[in-house]
Image (cartoon, coloured by chain):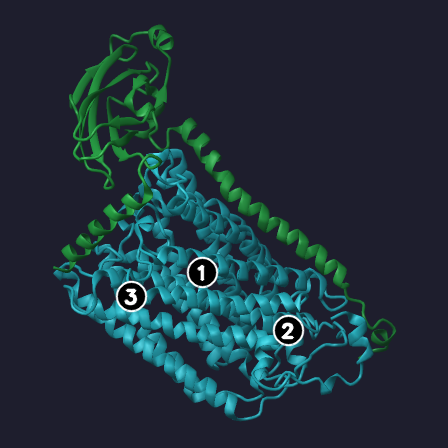
Amino acid sequence: MSDHQADQPHPRATNKSHAAVAGKMLALAVGMFGFGYAMVPIYDIICEVTGLNGKTGRVSIAEAEAAKLDENREIVVQFTSTINASGSWKFEPTVREMRVKPGQTYQTSYYAENLTNATTVGQATPSVSPSEAAKYFNKTECFCFTQQLFEPLASKDMPLVFIIDPDLPLTVDRVTLSYTFFNSPGATPAADQSASLSPSLTGFTQEISQ
Amino acid sequence: MSYSDADAHHGDHDHHGPAPGLMRWVTTTNHKDIGTLYLWFSLIMFFIGGGMALIIRAELWAPGIQIVDPMFFNSMTTMHAIVMIFGVVMPAFVGLANWMIPMMLGAPDMALPRLNNWSFWIMPFAFTIMLSTLFMDSGGPAGGWTMYPPLVLQMGDSFAYVIFAIHFMGISSVMGSINIVATIFNMRAPGMTLMQMPMFVWTWLITAFLLIATIPVFAGAVTMLLTDRFFETSFFSAAGGGDPVMYQHIFWFFGHPEVYILILPAFGIISHIIPTFSRKQLFGYDSMVYATASIAFLSFIVWAHHMFTTGMPLAAELFFMFSTMMISVPTGVKVFNWVSTMWRGSMTFETPMLFAIGFVIMFTIGGLSGLMLAITPADIQYHDTYFVVAHFHYVLVPGAIYSLMAACYFWIPKWTGNMYDEKLGRMHFWISTIFVNVLFFPMHFVGLAGMPRRIPDYSLQFADWNAIATIGAFGFGFSQLMFVYIIFKCIKGGEKATGEVWEGARGLEWTVDSPAPYHTFEDSPTITPETITR
């Protein structure tokens, strides 16, 4: 080694600056963990702006009455339903298709029946496709806003009042509103859920292996 | 650990050997020991993950369900991915970083040696926890390594074990990365500027930043899965107002930088080997550094190309398509720089060089199929088919894994002091290269023809190519036993290696003896134009 080395045997950084670098990197790691969680509200905002996840809008009755009626357009609204694997329900739209004018309020309903012998709480989640139509599909009243309580084997018609915003892009002439009906997760004991889940899973694998 | 301690022992450091017995490996804080531990761990996991791959290929030998239960098949595809990504490629690169970065920088050890010990010893526990789920009644994780909800939430008892194992792996990677960043920033030999650092160090610095920035996001995503399953939250459950597609956004925000974590250190390794065996300096060092940084930056803004079929606005599809295609520019810069380095070089074709050239050619094949997948309308056709499987296996097996093989052959004389058996090494390369193409090339054909991935059965028209791929898989898998044999043979003995090992090799790691003494560069080296790689 050179003389230069002998004069300055330890010109490298000290342990203190290791701690400084490590501390900054650790702060970055912790910050990014927080960013992962921050993506949840960010995602919701982006979805609200773009209609990305097909979530529909909600307006007050006054706002709906103030909307300008567009007599010249006719939009086909289709209704579909899905039952989530975790529940035992009958759930379907009372009307499958409507022809509507933007700016006018319409009412329809979905029929739901609890097929179990237990009091059950259900909840519906809407999704509109195409997604660019989602933010123009507004509701003043919807069963999806609240949890629905069902007595054993009870059934009911659940109302839905909607209005299509006249600003709906001209490229859209057909909108599909899909509801998925769930056992409301907060209202059902978790143990029941997993119990109902595993037999269906086992059945699924058996089915494939046959 | 302080430098004044080292100073007190100045002059007699040659007597500092490793502690005797097994406890040496448990308590070690020596970067070479820890590097060795990481490399052995990753080699063992390579055979575990490879065994899983062979179970998959054996089942896919013919249409129909023959050998394994479909649930077990699914857990094999899931575990194969997790083991190979988190248990093989990442620890192997960390092992190489441990061994080589201090030596390349002229540093006596890593900046935080005790943290280093901890980073390694978490890994065997993490993988023991994860692999133990295979023996549970509910079986191992079977929802794919991407762990999409709601499917993953229906997993059996293994779910919590896998999540905790992933947390451990993440903690290990982040600690290892913090250590690497601190080492590179603080421990360079006096006079070595950032733009004089060897390429392997540069690529690892950028990789470490990617790890620190993305692994915590992944940890957050799996924690949300955990609370969705056990604590009644609804991040990803539509029933409670969440959105399962959001998981895919968070996951791929981590997942796409992750694929560059798996390849950037490989770029660094290749940038050492090609100049050495071309007997030229690396062509375009500066552009290599900037290309690496550009790839790292772009990797954060392309994630949704994994999700074109989930439905997104046209503007987003266009953005993610073009930003993805843009990555091929810096990657192309790298490939052309390697080719230009070889141009008119005095090339010889020792085993590391063969693997490096194999890497350049076959990684480029994988890169080009990646470009095809970037095209949104085409991707809707290719999505979740074997074409995707062919694509990422071309960049990971003859890509990342070949770079690791090349690195082992390149540096093993420095590690053991013995030359490996060159004849067997070349045989290993040629046999592997033939079989790896027999294994993965037909997957392009069945994929374009519509064969879906992750399913144990398939339509009859895919039978021939699948049988060929299975032959390739067994050929490739068993030829890796040669690699193990060559390593053991090299450790036991062989032609003695010089300090320089390779004619005209540049870099500080070649200025120390072979095998490298237990402690190197306790006194800082002097940086001269001959000792820097650029």
> Tag 1, which secondary structure?
helix
Crowding around mark 1 (Cα neighbors within 10 Å: few <14, some 14 to 19, many 20+) is: many
In the image, residue B270 lies at what x, y percent? 51, 69
Quarter of the image where the C terminus of chain B is located: bottom right
**In which quarter of the view is residue A146 placed?**
top left
In the image, residue B194 lies at what x, y percent? 68, 60
Residue contact between numbered discs 2 and 1, judged by CB atoms under 8 Å:
no
Q: Nearer the viewer, mark 2 or mark 1?
A: 1
Looking at marks 2 and 3 on the same chain, the residue that comes earlier in the sequence is marked by: 2
Q: What numbered label is drawn on residue B29?
A: 2
Crowding around mark 3 (Cα neighbors within 10 Å: few <14, some 14 to 19, many 20+) is: many
- Which amino acid type is shown beneath numbered disc 2? Thr
Per the model, the C-alpha gap separating discs 1 and 3 is: 33 Å
Q: Which residue occupies the foreground of this view, B88 or A194?
A: A194
- Which amino acid type is shown beneath numbered disc 3? Phe
Shown in green, the chain is: A
Per the model, the C-alpha gap separating discs 2 and 1 is: 24 Å
Q: What numbered label is drawn on residue B165?
A: 1
Chain hosting mark 1: B
Looking at marks 2 and 1 on the same chain, the residue that comes earlier in the sequence is marked by: 2
Residue at mark 2 shares a chain with residue at mark 3: yes
Q: What numbered label is drawn on residue B441?
A: 3
Vertical placement of B227 versus B185: above or below? above
Vertical placement of B481 versus B210: above or below? below
Residue at mark 1 shares a chain with residue at mark 3: yes
**In which quarter of the view is residue B394 placed?**
bottom left
Vertical placement of A143 versus B323: above or below? above
Chain hosting mark 3: B
Chain B palette colour:
cyan
Residue contact between numbered discs 2 and 3, judged by CB atoms under 8 Å:
no
- Which amino acid type is shown beneath numbered disc 1? Ala
